[in-house]
């Protein structure tokens, strides 16, 4: 990312159909410079830029994408371990592969930045040529936008789909108005869960942007890291990464801090851009029944209602989110495989998997928590 200016990259990003804060130049640089996603952790960035003839690098950027060359499949949230195993069993190398994604961030959005359909098509061709020259087994663009998916489909890439859960604001006046849109069972459940947190003596404070001071980021990271360690893993992101968020992108963050008996004991962090909020991280130093639901769903939803945000994206997987009125949506990825026989086999696999995902979505939609009629 150092070879392209932030203004050129971010200007092109802003013109896309689904820009997110996670594709900003500062965010991607912070991933690498904080040693969170870098060659040492298995994420080697390769930035592809196409320029208009006779134009300056600052004003002539026609298309751009960042690929990560990887020796593993960790931190992607689109699982291809079975593909890697099949390659291995046939004496072939699946790694290195290339991934067009935001590391550790399963948020749909624009990945192939371009000023026109023609530029995007040329960018995709350049990605394939780079893969062939470098002898990568494959290229995968994850959680891509609808127009990115259309472009890769037209280029003959394979499609893969999964399910996420997003909350949509139907112009609710307040949280009670939102609850009134749910069926009685779900409405009662949410009220019970919120009551348990309140009766435990937990209250919340919300900080936005520059209000989040260094000590607040320190507390957040303590909670975030402890939650990872409790699950037997080291955290993907370093403290330095979040310091860079405070320094370069403070306007894109909202922090909910839980207090109990005068002591901070949990928090959740969401990202924001435009009128969309993205649930990202949480952690707790003490266990309280239903605290996760309050910190990660109810506090952000109430905040979105109060601040006029139209959508809250809950992240990858998690059917339990439906009970909190986050509804199922389809998220997509695109895949190019160099080996023709494996490409054919994966295509057949994805056709079968796709039918299963469609049936799963249909089943989920039939169980909507919203009132009928």
Image: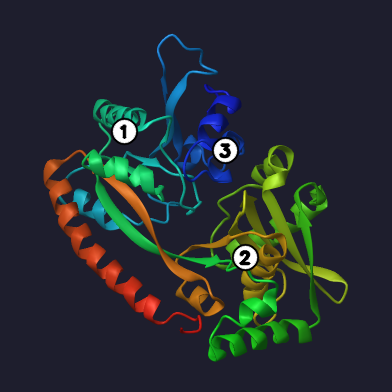
Q: Nearer the viewer, residue 49 or 281?
A: 49
The residue wearing badge 3 is 24
Figure check: 351 above or below 92: below
Q: Earlier in the sequence, mark 2 or mark 3?
A: 3
Q: Nearer the viewer, residue 118 or 108?
A: 118
Q: Earlier in the sequence, mark 1 or mark 3?
A: 3
The residue wearing badge 1 is 124
The residue wearing badge 2 is 227
**Where does the image place residue 316, in percent across and percent down from the top left?**
47, 62
Figure check: 291 above or below 147: below
Q: Nearer the viewer, mark 1 or mark 2?
A: 1
Residue 228 visible in the current orientation? yes
Crowding at dot 3, Cα within 10 Å, few <14 / some 14-19 / many 20+, comes out as: some
Whether residues under marks 1 and 3 lie with C-beta atoms below 8 angstroms apart, the answer is no
Alpha carbon separation for disc pair 1 and 3: 20 Å
Alpha carbon separation for disc pair 1 and 2: 39 Å
Direction from residue 314 to residue 134 in the image, left or right: left
Q: Residue at x 79, y 46 (%)?
A: 210
């Amino acid at each position: 990312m150092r070879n392209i200016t932030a203004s050129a990259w971010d200007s092109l990003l802003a013109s896309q159909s689904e820009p997110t804060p996670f594709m900003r130049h500062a965010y991607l640089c912070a991933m690498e410079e904080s040693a969170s996603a870098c060659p040492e952790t298995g994420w080697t960035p390769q930035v592809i830029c196409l320029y208009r003839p006779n134009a300056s690098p600052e004003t002539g950027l026609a298309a751009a994408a960042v690929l990560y060359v990887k020796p593993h499949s960790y931190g992607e949230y689109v699982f291809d371990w079975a593909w890697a195993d099949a390659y291995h069993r046939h004496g072939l190398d699946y790694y290195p592969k290339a991934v067009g994604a935001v590391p550790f961030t399963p948020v749909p959005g624009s990945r192939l930045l371009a000023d026109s359909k023609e530029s995007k098509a040329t960018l995709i061709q350049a990605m394939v040529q780079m893969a062939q020259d470098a002898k990568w087994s494959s290229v995968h663009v994850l959680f891509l936008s609808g127009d990115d998916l259309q472009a890769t489909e037209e280029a003959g890439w394979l499609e893969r789909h999964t399910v996420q859960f997003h909350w949509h604001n139907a112009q609710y006046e307040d949280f009670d108005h939102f609850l009134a849109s749910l069926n009685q069972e779900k409405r009662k459940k949410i009220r019970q869960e919120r009551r348990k947190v309140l009766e435990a003596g937990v209250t919340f404070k919300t900080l936005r942007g520059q209000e989040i001071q260094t000590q607040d980021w320190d507390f957040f990271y303590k909670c975030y890291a402890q939650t990872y360690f409790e699950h037997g893993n080291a955290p993907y992101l370093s403290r330095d990464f979040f310091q860079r968020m405070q320094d370069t992108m403070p306007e894109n963050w909202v922090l909910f801090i839980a207090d109990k008996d005068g002591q901070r004991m949990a928090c959740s962090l969401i990202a924001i851009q435009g009128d969309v909020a993205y649930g990202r991280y949480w952690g707790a130093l003490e266990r309280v029944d239903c605290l996760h639901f309050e910190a990660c769903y109810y506090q952000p939803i109430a905040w979105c209602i109060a601040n006029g945000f139209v959508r809250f994206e809950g992240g990858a997987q998690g059917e339990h989110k439906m009970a909190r009125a986050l509804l199922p949506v389809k998220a997509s990825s695109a895949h190019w495989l160099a080996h023709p026989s494996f490409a054919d086999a994966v295509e057949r696999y994805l056709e079968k998997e796709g039918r299963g995902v469609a049936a799963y979505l249909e089943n989920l939609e039939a169980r909507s928590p919203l009132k009928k009629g």
